[in-house]
Amino acid sequence: MSALSDPAERLALTLTQGGMQRMTARVLAALLFTERDTLTAGEIAETLTISSGSVSTALKSLTSVGLIEKVPAPGSRREHFRFREGAWATLMSEQNQLVKVMREAAEQGIAATGEDSSAGRRLAEMRDFYDYLWRELPAVIDRWKAQR
C-alpha cells in the first residue's frame, strides 16, 4: 500500500483545521479515498505509516461519532472498517446534542448576566441562533435523505 494521495492529505489537513485530531483526519481520509470496500487497522497503519495505537484511537473516535463502522469480513479474523453509508447526515444528527448544549449554555449565561446587559444581548443572539438550528437541522437532514 502507498501513502495517501495529495487530495486525501489535503482533505485530512482541512479536517484538522476544522478541529479534528490530525491522525483521526488522516484515518478518515484513508477510508474515504480507498477503492476497497473495507480496510483493517493494520492496513490503515501501513498506508499511513503510523502506529497501530494511533489508528486504534482514531478508529474508536470515528466509530463513536458514526462516520465509520466495523463490518464482518468472511474468512478474516481481523476487524474491518468502512466509511458508513449516510455518515454525513448521521454526523449532523449527532450535532443536535451539541446544539442543545450550546443553547443551554447561552441560557445559563443570560440568567447570570441578565438579558438587558451587553453580555446578555450577545448571549441572547447565541441562544436564538441555536434555537433556530435546533428547529431547522432535522428538516434539512430529512430533505437531504429524501433527495438521495
Image (spheres, helix red, strand yellow):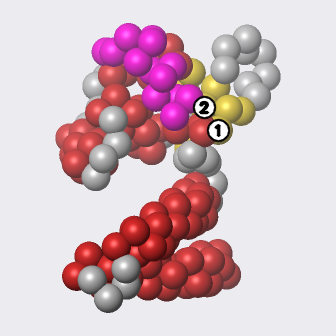
Question: Which residue is at 27% across, 83% downward?
Answer: 117
Q: Which residue is mark 1?
A: 69
**Residue 29's image quarter?**
top left
Crowd tier of the residue under label 1, counting other residues whose Cα lies within 10 Å: few below 14, some 14–19, many 20 or above: many
Q: Secondary structure at mark 1?
A: strand
Residue 98 left/right relative to 86: left
Q: Is residue 77 above or below residue 2?
A: above
Residue 42 left/right relative to 12: right
State the residue lying farthest toward the right.
74
Q: Residue 22: image x %, image y %?
A: 29, 33
Is 141 magenta? The answer is no
Q: Which residue is mark 2?
A: 81
Q: Residue 17: image x %, image y %?
A: 22, 48
Amino acid carrying label 2: it is Phe
Question: Which residue is at 52% across, 61% downward?
Answer: 101
Q: First in sequence: mark 1 or mark 2?
A: 1
Q: Secondary structure at mark 2?
A: strand
Is 53 magenta? The answer is yes
Q: Residue 5: image x %, image y %?
A: 26, 37
Q: Is residue 77 above or below residue 113?
A: above
Residue 8 left/right relative to 111: left
* Numbered tag placed on residue 134 in the rendering: none
Give the magenta part as a residue range.
49-61
Q: Nearer the viewer, residue 29 or 90?
A: 90
Q: CA distance from mark 1 to mark 2?
A: 6 Å
Q: Are marks 1 and 2 in contact (CB under 8 Å)?
A: yes
Q: Is residue 53 above or below residue 133?
A: above
**Residue 80's image quarter?**
top right
